Image (tube, rainbow, N blue to C red):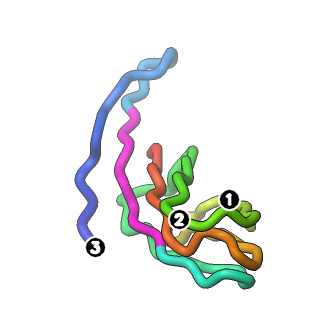
Amino acid sequence: MANTYLFQRQNLTGEYLRGAPVSVTTVAGTANTVAHGLPATPRVVIYIPQNGNGNWFETQPADSINLYITVGAGGPTAFTAIGDY
């Protein structure tokens, strides 16, 4: 999956950060591992649910390959995630 970054900004230490969208499809009621395809480990991931209204949470911080999200019963099955790397 090729990701195109949406924006680039410079933080207070002079480091440039990029934000890229990742489409996430999850299975409700389970822990989900989703490959993000970003070129680096995201420092921050913002999840935007696209449907459903149940509980969900990040199971563990993202690593260099995957996002980890757990969705409760009736929770969202589609997200847009913005990975800031």
Under mark 2, the amino acid is Asn
Under mark 1, the amino acid is Pro
Count neighbours of disc 1 (C-alpha within 10 A) and say few if under 14, some if 14 to 19, many if 20 or more: some
Residue placed under numbered mark 2 in the picture: 51
Left or right, 85 with respect to 51, comes to left
Left or right, 27 with respect to 58, comes to left
Disc 1 is placed on an element classified as: loop
> How far is disc 1 from disc 2 in space, using C-alphas?
23 Å
Please say if 49 is above or below 35: above
Query: Of marks 1 and 3, which one's residue comes earlier in the chain?
Result: 3
The numbered dot on residue 61 is 1
Disc 3 is placed on an element classified as: loop
Count neighbours of disc 2 (C-alpha within 10 A) and say few if under 14, some if 14 to 19, many if 20 or more: few
Is 12 in front, or is 32?
A: 32
Please say if 59 is above or below 25: above
Tell me which segment is drawn in magenta.
17-24
